[in-house]
Image (cartoon, helix red, strand yellow):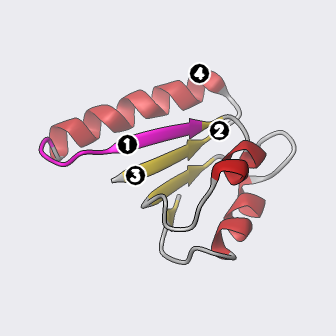
Amino acid sequence: MKIALVDDEIIQLQHLQELLSAELNAKLPNSPHWIDTYRSGQSFLDHFQSGKYDVIVLDIFMGGMLGIDVARKIRESDNDARLV
């Protein structure tokens, strides 16, 4: 499973990554997963490719670009990724 976490607050981003990784390792020990982190919506969009992620977790209020704006951009080319 490929997951992207997008949040401008570094502490929250690291904490979410640690929790998610621990849960995935506990629940799906034989299933590989990758978690990429991005500190802004624009940074994420600069690296985004349609089909690259199964799940994308977006902070709503980020400096510069709102999570809903990022979600709209994602949906322009990727209808399959699950957005949280």
Per the rendered image, the range of residues in magenta is 29-37
Give x and y (percent) for residue 83. Answer: 54, 63
Mark 1–mark 3 Cα distance, whole angstroms, equals 5 Å
Residue type at the position of mark 2: Asp
- The circle on residue 2 is 3
Q: Is residue 38 left or right of residue 33?
A: right
Q: Is residue 36 visible?
A: yes
Mark 3–mark 4 Cα distance, whole angstroms, equals 21 Å
> Marks 3 and 1: in contact by CB < 8 Å?
yes
Q: Is residue 63 left or right of residue 44?
A: right
Q: Which residue is mark 2?
A: 7
| Residue ID at (63%, 56%) | 48
Mark 2–mark 1 Cα distance, whole angstroms, equals 17 Å
Extreme-left residue of the structure: 30
Mark sitting earlier along the chain (1/3) = 3
Q: Is residue 32 magenta?
A: yes
| Residue ID at (53%, 58%) | 84
**Closer to the observer: label 2 or label 3?**
3
Mark sitting earlier along the chain (2/3) = 3
